[in-house]
Image: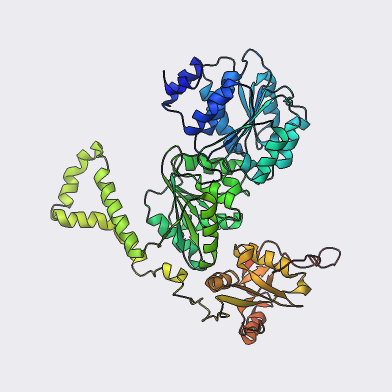
Amino acid sequence: MTPFEALGLDQPLLHAISDLGFENPSEVQEKAIPILLAKETDLVALAQTGTGKTAAFGFPLIQKIHVESRTTQGLILSPTRELCLQITNEIQLYSKYMKGLNTVAIYGGASISEQAKKIKKGAQIVVATPGRMKDMIGRGMVDISKIDYCILDEADEMLNMGFYEDIKDILSNTPQEKSTWLFSATMPKEVSSIAKKFMYKPHEITVGEKNTGATTVQHEHYVVGGRDRYPALKRLADANPGIFSVVFCRTKRDTQKVAEKLIEDGYNAGALHGDLSQNQRDLVMNAFRKKQIQMLVATDVAARGIDVDDITHVINYQLPDEIETYTHRSGRTGRAGKSGISMVIVTRSELRKIKAIEKKIKQDFIEKKIPTGIEICEIQLYHLTRSIKDTPINEEIEGYLPAINDVLKDVDREELIKKIVSVEFTRFYNYYSKTRDLNAAGSHSEGKERSGKGNYESTGDGSVRYFINVGERDGFDWMSLKDFLKENLGLDKEDIYKVDTKDSFSFFNTDDSLTPLVLEIFTDFKVDGRFINVEVSTKPGRGGKSKKRNRGRRDDRRGRGGSKGRNASNFKGGKNKSGKRKNKNRKGFV
């Protein structure tokens, strides 16, 4: 008896499993399948992404479907189009020997009428994204009033994406007596709420510990100065020549910007974010799956549903706001029993977040140093040498060998090896031989960096106070100004503090390690054609004066609109159409 046969699966499924080359069930499959086959029950299964959850619910669902009936009997909800299509494909592979069983995917970005036609022909299993499913229910294009099974896959991700109300509306159109199977990587309160409202005494199984990270993933963090994130990213990529990674950024703007920089610098990179059309997203994902893209730069929302087993690294270019989001990010690597690495690029001010993540995932981070330029040259040299050794010989070259040997006849073996290796090695050496140590900028002993605009002065508590030339007259209070700074600097709210708004100007603080980033971002920075000027306060202890003379010269020079500058897409301050100032009623503590 095979391990899958011992779980109680029928022959048609066992044939399909054999064709797919599965030999042993994963832990979540071993725990879930016997429960779901034994009786009609609700189930909550907590397991990391990449542990075989689709088969854990797919095998029992297929076995319980009555193929002679064309009625929709099973509904699977998943967070994204990509995951919806992937689940559909896997269910079709599992059910290849179940004649008459039809599985249909419904999702946004495709013809709703074509999807409705497929369901009308008879679809016992429907796999859907919540938004499109709710739309089709509202139009009367799909009937789920008689389903026997409802599966919520990646439930926490669906709720993180704001589908709570959609899921509640969808479930309210299903019969009470159905079985509900909920699969999730984490168990936040919103998932618990769904379980309590729509499930009856569910069995609960957990693979590993609740809300912990996958044990196949090693977690590393690298401390750098705020302006050194991108150079650090490049070095981490160059120090891992075989990298196949997802790079996570917090905003769509940063995602596009980082991807464009990587492409300009010669890396096989691509961007995945919400501003791309569905066709553009499909092209990027297809290129990534084929490994034509080695570094996929993505936002958290766009990356949900990425299910590629051999991702070697996840790189957190910026940490997410929520710890649960980090768990999902790191779960993109170390899948299907393989090992993976999750790297985090942080500033000193963000180290407290690392401690919070460690506590949540119950795993320690390894603090590592960004490789030096010479270390990277050495890594690339040995990688090139191994590549040459492992390159298969193309026999078509045989006819060209006499001419090649004639050209190289005066070059001895040792010199020839040096020349071959130098072709690639020289490129890295020329770039890295004179670069600085990025770790110094993030270390406590280094303290202050030069920003390119002179030294800056700490307040004495490790922070720096800044002057900014917008205030209450521009429609800002302390909270809206903090939001404006957070969005444009790509920082968390807690990185910006002691915000003090005046009539026509304001002050704020950051940790001193972030000063180069602040000054760099607000160099030639425009909003609606107006320059927004940020300078270090010359009286940080009293929060008072800025470098007035410098500011005056800069404003005089730029105020006439003759200079080019960076332009923010929208201005959080200012007045609305009625002429009233915005955000004046917001309260809170800085």
Q: Nearer the viewer, residue 86 or 74?
A: 74
Q: Residue furthest top?
A: 68
Q: Residue furthest front?
A: 201
Residue found at x 19% / y 54%: 416
Residue found at x 45% / y 71%: 441
Q: Nearer the viewer, residue 503 or 460?
A: 460
Residue 144 lies, in percent from the top left, at: 72, 25
Residue 83 lies, in percent from the top left, at: 57, 36
* 271 is higher (above) or lower (below) than 552: above
Q: Nearer the viewer, residue 416 or 51?
A: 51
Residue found at x 67% / y 84%: 544
Q: Give the left or right position of residue 243, taking residue 42 as reference.
A: left
Q: Residue furthest bottom?
A: 549
Residue 566 lies, in percent from the top left, at: 61, 67
Q: Give the left or right position of residue 181, taking residue 480 as reference.
A: left
Residue 422 lies, in percent from the top left, at: 26, 58
Which corner quadrant holds the N terminus?
A: top left
